[in-house]
Amino acid sequence: LKALEPDPGRRYESARALAADVERHLAGRPVAARPASRAYRTRRFLRRHRAGVAASAALATLLAGLGAFHTARLTAERETAERERDKAAGVVGFLTSMLAAADPNEALGDTLTVYDVLARSERRLDTALAAQPAVRAELLRVLGATYGELGDYPRSARLLERALVTARATAREGEDRAGDSAATDVARALALT
């Protein structure tokens, strides 16, 4: 349309200027006949560099996806670490109170054996840790393994089976470490009975 302008000042200065504009059009570059708006220049750039823009967009998408995946993975690992920390704190607290029962001031003059302390602890597990099944499962496993070390295999197997059931019921998908260690202990205890 610039070549057909009625006003001579708005037309191409020469045939050479018109040819240069046609060459720019054929090369996908902005032409002088149109106003050089940002949207027009951007469209021309995108048409001229389709492969590069597509590769850049694919790379940006890939990097964003990897970043999101990595963030989700870190979040899951942090949550797992926090659960394990809380479980360890519960186990330590229970074991500390269990061993405190052997204190002469707490035992009120009774002579307590290891079996007595273990039996008291076993009775306390279901009530004291009702709201913490993962901690209860780990302590059932510890008590079962302890009975196994003491040679009381039937009691060991019973506690370890309870630990296994409790651990599997509370385990999240893909992180059944407590259930795996309880399963190993149950198999060992059953082999010894």
Image (cartoon, rainbow, N blue to C red):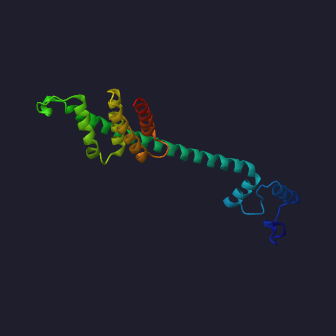
Q: Quick one: 30 or 88, which is closer to the camera?
A: 88
Q: Position of residue 186 (x, y in %)?
A: 42, 35
Spot the residue most to the bottom.
6
| Residue 80 drawn above or below residue 40 | above
Q: Quadrant of residue 150?
A: top left
In this rendering, the answer to whether 49 lies above or below 8 is above
Left/right of residue 9 with respect to residue 108 in the rendered view: right
Choose top left, top right, bottom left or bottom right for residue 123. Answer: top left
Q: Residue at x 33, y 45 (%)?
A: 132
Camera-side residue of 117 and 86: 117
Q: Quadrant of the N terminus?
A: bottom right
**In percent of the image, x 35 and y 45: which residue is there?**
133
| x, y percent for residue 83 | 38, 42
Q: Could you tell me residue 47's position as x and y percent?
A: 75, 55
Name, please, the residue furthest toward the front. Answer: 193
Image quadrant assignment for residue 192: top left
Q: Position of residue 51 (x, y in %)?
A: 74, 49
Task: State the quadrant of the C terminus.
Answer: top left
Of residues 1 and 105, the one nearer the viewer is 105
- Which residue appears at 62% of the width and 49% of the height? 61
126 vs 26, left or right, is left
Q: Can you name the residue that lies furthest to the left here?
A: 109
